[in-house]
């Protein structure tokens, strides 16, 4: 039982790390213009040698970008909260009960990641300036999509898991 508990905790910590990397790292969109340096764009900045804010990110035209920002931050916060709730429930719930509250929070985090990555996929053209539209998805975007099934599986594990001795 101790090995299963350690696996679940490590799996949850991996989900948290993936969400932090996807949210913070600046490689959601990568543009390689010929003869110039590679430009990396994340949810807040576009960077080559120096970083500058994403143009019009504070306007209503960038509402999709703001939705992606909000849902990725919310997913990261929910994943961290669900970890602490799991630790508290580990000591508080009675033997034989399920970790339902932890599972619900983790599944909500998974839903937020899916929403953020889906919005970014569908609306990437609307919040990139024309000079940055000829690019490709970066590593943070891929990590965000990888963190979706990881958080989903983690939430489902908590739904099935029962407390034992």
Image (cartoon, grey):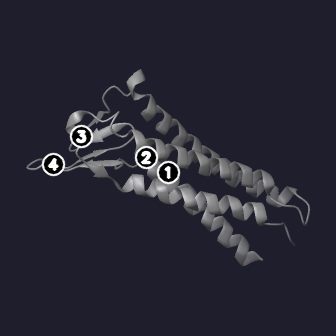
Frontmost of labels 3 and 4 is: 3
As drawn, which residue projects farthest toward the left? 35
Picture coordinates of residue 152, whole percent (x, y) = 62, 58
Residue 119's place in the image compared with 38, above or below, is above
Residue 8 shown left or right of residue 135 in the figure: right
Picture coordinates of residue 54, whole percent (x, y) = 32, 33
Q: CA distance from mark 3 to mark 4?
A: 13 Å
Who comes first in sequence, dot 2 or dot 3? 2
As drawn, which residue projects farthest toward the front? 122
- Of 43 and 119, nearer the camera is 119
Q: Residues within 10 Å of mark 3 (few under 14, many from 20)?
A: some
Q: Residues within 10 Å of mark 4 (few under 14, many from 20)?
A: few
Report the disc number at residue 24: 2
* Residue contact at pointers 2 and 1, CB within 8 angstroms: yes
* Residue contact at pointers 1 and 3, CB within 8 angstroms: no
Q: CA distance from mark 2 to mark 3?
A: 20 Å
Report the disc number at residue 37: 4
Q: Secondary structure at mark 3?
A: helix
Q: Secondary structure at mark 4?
A: loop
Question: Dividing the image into 4 quarters, which one contains the N terminus?
Answer: bottom right
Q: CA distance from mark 1 to mark 4?
A: 26 Å
Residue 137's place in the image compared with 127, above or below, is below
- Of 5 and 123, nearer the camera is 123
Who comes first in sequence, dot 4 or dot 2? 2
Q: CA distance from mark 4 to mark 2?
A: 21 Å
Picture coordinates of residue 21, whole percent (x, y) = 45, 53
Q: CA distance from mark 2 to mark 1?
A: 6 Å
* Residue contact at pointers 3 and 4, CB within 8 angstroms: no
Q: Is residue 100 visible?
A: yes
Query: Which residue position holds label 3?
Result: 132
Residue 26's place in the image compared with 57, above or below, is below
Report the disc number at residue 20: 1
């Amino acid at each position: 039982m101790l090995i299963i508990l350690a696996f679940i905790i490590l799996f949850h910590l991996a989900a948290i790390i993936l969400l932090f990397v996807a949210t913070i790292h600046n490689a959601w969109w990568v543009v390689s213009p010929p003869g110039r340096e590679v430009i990396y764009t994340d949810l807040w900045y576009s960077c080559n040698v120096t970083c500058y804010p994403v143009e019009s990110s504070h306007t209503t035209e960038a509402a999709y970008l703001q939705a992606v920002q909000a849902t990725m931050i919310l997913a990261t916060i929910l994943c961290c909260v669900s970890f602490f709730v799991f630790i508290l429930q580990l000591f508080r719930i009675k033997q034989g009960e399920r970790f339902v509250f932890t599972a619900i929070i983790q599944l909500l985090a998974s839903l937020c990641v899916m929403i953020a990555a889906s919005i970014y996929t569908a609306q990437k053209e609307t919040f990139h300036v024309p000079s940055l539209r000829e690019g490709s998805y970066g590593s943070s975007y891929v990590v965000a999509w990888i963190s979706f099934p990881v958080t989903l599986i983690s939430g489902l594990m908590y739904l099935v898991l029962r407390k034992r001795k």
